[in-house]
Image (cartoon, rainbow, N blue to C red):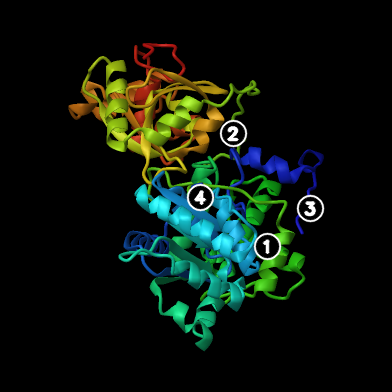
Amino acid sequence: MVHSSSPEKSGIQTVYESWYGFREKPFNLTPDPKYLYLSQRHAEAIAHLEFGRRERGGFVLITGEVGTGKTTLARYFLSKLGPDTATAFVLYPALTADELLRTILDDLHVTPEGDSKKSLVDALHRFLLEARAANRSVVLLIDEAQDLSAEVLEQVRLISNLETDTEKLIQIVLMGQSELRDMLARHELRQLAQRVNARYHLSPLSLAETGEYVRHRVVVAGGESKVGFTSDALAAVHQASGGVPRLVNLVCDRALLAGYVQNVRTITAAMVQQAEREVVAESARPAFRWHHGLIATGLTVALALAAFAMAPRLARAPEAPSASVPAAAAPAAPSRSAPTPAAPTRSDRLDQLLRETPRAASFAAAAARIAAAWGGQPLSRATLRTHLDQLRALDLPVALEMFHPSRRDTCFVALLRLSDASATVTVGDSPRIEAPVGQLDALWTRDAVVWWLEPESARSGAGEAWARRALADLGHADAELTTAVSGFQQTIGLVPDGLLGPRTRMALFAMTPGGRPRLTGQEGAP
């Protein structure tokens, strides 16, 4: 067990989150689609789901071991379906056949005329025919389907019989653990198994994917350049977890706690191994190593309960390529903003526009709005995976890529103002909208397109000389350019690698004096 030796660290579970500079915990066990890391395997699983949805026939079967991300994948898939698709999502399938039908009808907002099974099936059939007449699709997704009884699986098969002369009226997705494949291989379920037209098995992450997964979650949680895992630490995480995302979360969460107690922001292999031992001890089991996805379900549940109170969220690589998650060199605590005032009420107008505005039109409108703010000057452009704190540091208007649970694709907003509590945005040709930061941040994919004015001297090949002058103006003069760059990077929360990469140059241009549009609205307001 980790024990705190100083009074100020007595509230470890809540304090270490802010100490690292996370907006939220990176390695939570909850299935948040925002944190979905699309490994090659997860991308292939989504492709199978899309294929099954387009074909409108038979079942789609997605299986995987405990903790491989099936539920997160399910939520992500459903969040991408547009308003032309009605969905029913059954999370806890330990139901009778009648209870399953009622659950499906409740999710589809259908009221049956009676309580008999015939009334339930008739109500569902009417809804499916009405949806077909309105050119809408209907998707039923059942998670943890290995818990379905044979009786209920037969009811699911009968639901799939609801069809017209030319096509099925409902697409059914079954997701579950490996036992689900064994169940469908049984003789009495052969009719259902024969109707599976797309199937995929999710295997654990590789060593490289485990590192990317850790990096991704740290970035999403707002920890980019604030905490790092060495290459050896990532290898230890993969060895301890076998590449199973849920187990990666448990180990990384506890390793971050160890780093906090030791006052460091670079996580080492020794910390990961210590974290592994602690989780094992709390689960009261002698071992914590699973390979090739062969996971003991009971132990996984015990681990989840043992670590329930501690779980973080996301991060990503800086401009310098590295095998490990980048970390800032200095252990100084990140700066803290003033207390956030009460946020404004939710913007229903923003919600409506995010549902309705076409993707291409939204980006063109955001780009035009930001170009106009710069007065039509020739601009450089880059797409960043970032977070709000870094956007505040850049202090430039940007286009944010947004998702909405009711649509299949994404769209863009132009972010023109940003305070602690509220944001001013436009979507398409809409007038400006004042929205709470929390609402904006919850629907932001973390991708931002940034425009900035690159000085003529930098574009003409004199970039190093310009950078030296700009760094000196900002108080970072040094005979060694790398030292000056490192000092500047550390000041603004980037990895102090001393390299004039695109993100560092962008920040340097943004912070030099001169009239320009600003998110704070101070100079050259858009």
Q: Nearer the viewer, mark 4 or mark 2?
A: 4
Disc 1 marks a residue whose amino acid type is Gln
| Label of residue 3 in the image | 3
Disc 4 packing (10 Å; few <14; some 14–19; many ≥20) = some
Q: Name the residue under label 1.
A: 274
**Given contact means CB atoms under 8 Å apart, are the residues at marks 4 and 2 in contact?**
no
Mark sitting earlier along the chain (2/1):
1
Q: Earlier in the sequence, mark 1 or mark 3?
A: 3
Nearer to the camera, 263 or 325 = 325
**Based on the displayed image, in which of its 4 quarters is residue 306 positioned?**
bottom right
Q: Name the residue under label 4.
A: 33
* Residue topped by disc 2: 334
| Residue shown at 61% from the left, 53% from the top | 30
Cα distance between the residues tagged 4 and 2:
27 Å
Rendered position, 185 above or below 69: below
Q: Is mark 2 on a helix, strand or loop?
A: loop
* Disc 1 versus disc 4: nearer the observer: 4
